[in-house]
Image: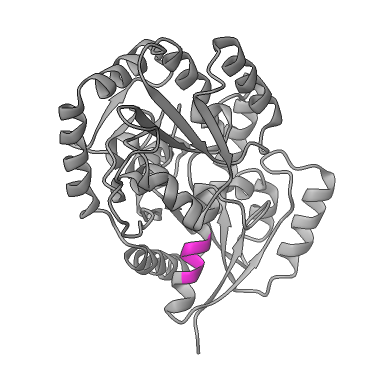
């Protein structure tokens, strides 16, 4: 009999963010390994669900058969502790934590406290917890999750052609940032840093949804206008496939000034294209981007970020050395087939573990 599991993923399953992409690829890999996988949504409003979302989640989970192995994306699972407890004896909960909810940027202290308490309670009922980096595994130690219940399954990365640059014209640096426009991704910090480098030839291409946080998009647009950088920052929106590959191909430098990352799949994609990286030391980035391939600065530090970008613009030999390092690092990146195999093993261990 084929093994089976259910993925419980809130929101739009087709969203192009690292978390949703990870979920989709893992489902594909499990199916390729012979698993029967069903996908359900507990609703749209997570991590702050309303009464309708909670009622829908209760209905979906209540309809699952006894003994089902349920992989619950942490965006929803972390705020459903009562539901997790209610079904802990009949379902095998496996929490998929991309990063702890309370570490999201832009939360009020009250929201952080609420999410922290809620996720701690929910995780207590998980037979297994899958995280996407060793850094996130370390963070969960503070949540009281036993290390033996945590499995690190890093995302895979597709092989890609090396970037050739040229996307900003002769003599100009073409920078690429691939990230949803939210406070955590640090676009505002990047714009402030670039404002001090107007005297150098560069263009910044930004790929990623602008619709997820309209208030942040408006704030960033105002900052771009205030700094007079409208002609040098180009917004491409949410792109994928050939359009995204074209942006990688024409870039000279990848930049992502995140304030926190549970892994940083776009950073791995940049390495796979042989691009030098300028990013931050936040979360798991220090494990994703080796020193030979990029320079990492403290998150939120405008001056340090500006200094790294200035050096990348002024010292092409240094930038070329980082590009060589990125190509070496690309060969060490895990593949999706590897991630699927590790995820399968984590599910089998959780199924055998018994109730928490």
Which is more toward the observer, 54 or 236? 236
Q: Residue furthest bottom?
A: 1
226 shown above or below 36: above
Relative to 73, is 285 on the left or the right? left
Q: How many marks?
A: 0
347 shown above or below 232: below
Which is more toward the observer, 325 or 104? 325
Q: Is residue 26 one of those drawn in magenta?
A: yes
Q: Residue furthest front?
A: 170
Give me the residue at 44% from left, 71% from top: 29
Q: Is residue 238 one of those drawn in magenta?
A: no
Give me the residue at 36% from left, 10% from top: 303
Q: Is residue 131 visible?
A: no
The span shown in magenta is 24-28
Q: In the rendering, at what x and y percent does residue 242 appear?
A: 47, 57
271 shown above or below 68: above
Which is more toward the observer, 329 or 344? 329
Q: In the rendering, at what x and y percent does residue 182 appear?
A: 58, 31
Give me the residue at 79% from left, 62% from top: 59
> Which secondary structure dominates the residues rendered in magenta?
helix
Relative to 354, is 121 on the left or the right? right
58 shown above or below 279: below
């Amino acid at each position: 009999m084929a093994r089976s599991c259910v993925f419980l993923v809130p929101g739009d399953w087709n969203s192009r963010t690292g978390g949703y992409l990870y979920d989709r690829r893992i489902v594909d890999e499990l199916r390729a390994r012979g698993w029967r996988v069903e996908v359900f949504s507990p609703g749209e409003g997570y991590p702050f669900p309303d009464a309708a979302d909670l009622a829908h989640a209760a209905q979906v989970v209540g309809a699952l058969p006894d003994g089902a192995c349920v992989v619950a994306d942490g965006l929803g699972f972390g705020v459903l502790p009562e539901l997790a407890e209610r079904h802990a004896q009949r379902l095998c909960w496996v929490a998929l934590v991309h990063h702890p909810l309370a570490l999201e940027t832009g939360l009020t202290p009250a929201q952080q406290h609420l999410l922290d308490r809620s996720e701690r309670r929910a995780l207590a009922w998980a037979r297994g917890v899958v995280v996407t980096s060793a850094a996130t595994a370390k963070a969960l130690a503070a949540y009281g999750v036993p290390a033996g219940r945590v499995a690190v399954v890093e995302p895979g990365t597709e092989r890609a052609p090396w970037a050739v640059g040229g996307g900003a014209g002769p003599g100009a640096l073409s920078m690429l940032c691939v990230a949803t426009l939210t406070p955590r991704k640090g676009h505002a910090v990047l714009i402030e840093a670039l404002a001090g480098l107007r005297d150098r030839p560069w263009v910044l291409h930004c790929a990623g949804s602008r619709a997820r946080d309209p208030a942040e998009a408006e704030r960033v647009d105002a900052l771009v206008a205030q700094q007079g950088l409208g002609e040098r920052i180009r917004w491409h929106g949410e792109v994928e496939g050939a359009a995204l590959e074209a942006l990688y191909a024409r870039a000279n430098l990848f930049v992502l000034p995140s304030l926190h990352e549970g892994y940083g799949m776009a950073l791995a994609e940049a390495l796979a294209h042989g691009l030098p990286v300028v990013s931050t030391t936040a979360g798991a980035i220090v494990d994703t981007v080796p020193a030979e391939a990029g320079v990492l600065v403290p998150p939120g530090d405008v001056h340090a970020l500006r200094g790294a970008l200035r050096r990348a613009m002024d010292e092409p030999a240094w930038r070329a050395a980082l590009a060589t390092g990125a190509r070496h690092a690309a060969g060490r990146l895990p593949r999706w087939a590897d991630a699927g195999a590790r995820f399968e093993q984590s599910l089998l261990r959780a199924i055998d573990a018994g109730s928490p």
